Image: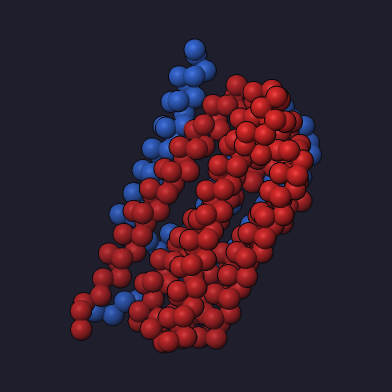
Chain colours: A red, B blue
């Protein structure tokens, strides 16, 4: 049987997470510069976003992280049913998050607020930039939610097949780390887009 | 060699979630009080505290060794330089 290397696997995942942090970090550099230059337009932009959606999505992701963390505790204690509940719960949260995003974006599209729309092109530069950043950052984040959900779904199947156990939980732990990072990124996205006053 | 399992009890995780939800409420509430340019920094400060909780508890950073802690802090430091210095540059043009 091949020797396992749980520490190595974990460090490998963290190194990847660092690249993700820099990826979103680059977008936040853009945000920071344009926010400083066009503060009033950014405030107007934030007012056009639906704060309720932002709050609900924030709560959903925080709860989902709790589910995933509980899953790790459970796998180490051998509470298989709780592992499954945690993974199903996190997947459900992710799905609801994406549905919310779909409704939120759809509403914006209907009101003529989408990249390249006449409304945005004709509006002050700062507002156009705000929504450009909004769509790119939340879009990229949404893609990461999908990737995270895929990882968790794989874990779910492997737990059912008893391939993920207390002795072999590296995949679950790493998938959890990825999911928590996606939550972390949203923790910053939320105030920067929805709470600008 | 046996791996000693690092476990946070369910109760600890639940309390952490409660803290995160409370802080979400605080940051939303703060957005209704107009303090000018201070608002952004308050929001970022609260977000950083929330992020630290997720990091230390949910992501088990509390149990990790120096390699992980320092590599993580370096990444955040790099980010701070990337954002801060760009800001600095643009602000004085």
Picture residue at 42% right of the left edge, 69% below the top: A173
Write down the quadrant of residue B74 in the picture. Answer: top left
Does the image show residue B45? no
Q: Is residue A101 above or below residue B43?
A: below
Q: Residue at x 50, y 55 (%)?
A: A144
Q: Residue at x 62, y 70 (%)?
A: A92
Above-or-below relation of B7 to A180: below
x, y percent for residue B56: 48, 58
Q: Is residue A78 above or below residue B59?
A: below
Q: Nearer the viewer, residue A13 or A161?
A: A161
Extreme residue in the left direction: A2
- Of A23 and A78, nearer the camera is A23
The image quadrant where one finds the N terminus of chain A is: bottom left
The answer to whether residue A183 shows anywhere in this view is yes
Q: Position of residue A106 (x, y in %)?
A: 71, 50
Report the number of numbered marks.
0
Please state the horizontal and vertical placement of residue A99, each as a whole percent of the image: 67, 60
Position of residue B65 relative to residue A48, above or below, is: below
Name the foreground residue: A139 vs A82: A139
Q: Position of residue B29 (x, y in %)?
A: 76, 45
Q: Residue at x 56, y 64 (%)?
A: A65
Quarter of the figure that contains the C terminus of chain A:
top right
* A157 on left or right of A86: left
A1 left or right of A42? left
| Left or right for A82, reference A16 | right
Give the side of residue A51 with respect to residue B58, left or right: right
């Amino acid at each position: 049987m091949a020797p396992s290397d749980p520490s190595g696997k974990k460090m490998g995942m963290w190194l990847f997470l660092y690249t993700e942090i820099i990826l979103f970090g680059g977008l936040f550099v853009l945000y920071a510069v344009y926010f400083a230059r066009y503060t009033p337009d950014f405030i107007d932009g934030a007012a056009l976003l639906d704060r309720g959606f932002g709050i609900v999505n924030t709560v959903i992701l925080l709860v989902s992280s709790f589910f995933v963390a509980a899953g790790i505790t459970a796998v180490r204690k051998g509470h298989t049913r709780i592992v499954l509940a945690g993974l199903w719960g996190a997947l459900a949260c992710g799905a609801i998050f994406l549905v919310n995003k779909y409704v939120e974006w759809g509403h914006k599209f209907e009101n003529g607020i989408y990249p390249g729309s006449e409304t945005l092109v004709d509006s002050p530069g700062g507002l156009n930039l705000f929504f450009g950043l909004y769509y790119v950052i939340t879009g990229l984040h949404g893609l990461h939610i999908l990737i995270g959900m895929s990882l968790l779904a794989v874990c779910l199947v492997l737990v059912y097949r008893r391939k993920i156990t207390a002795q072999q939980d590296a995949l679950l732990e790493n998938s959890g780390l990825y999911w928590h990072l996606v939550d972390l990124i949203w923790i910053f996205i939320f105030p920067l887009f929805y709470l600008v006053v | 060699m046996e791996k000693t399992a690092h476990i946070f009890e369910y109760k600890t995780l639940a309390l952490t979630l409660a803290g995160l939800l409370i802080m979400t409420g605080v940051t939303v509430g703060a957005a209704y009080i107009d303090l000018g340019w201070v608002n952004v920094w308050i929001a970022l400060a609260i977000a950083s505290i929330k992020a630290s909780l997720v990091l230390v508890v949910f992501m088990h950073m509390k149990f990790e060794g120096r390699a992980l802690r320092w590599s993580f802090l370096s990444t955040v430091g790099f980010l701070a330089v990337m954002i801060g210095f760009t800001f600095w540059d643009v602000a004085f043009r």
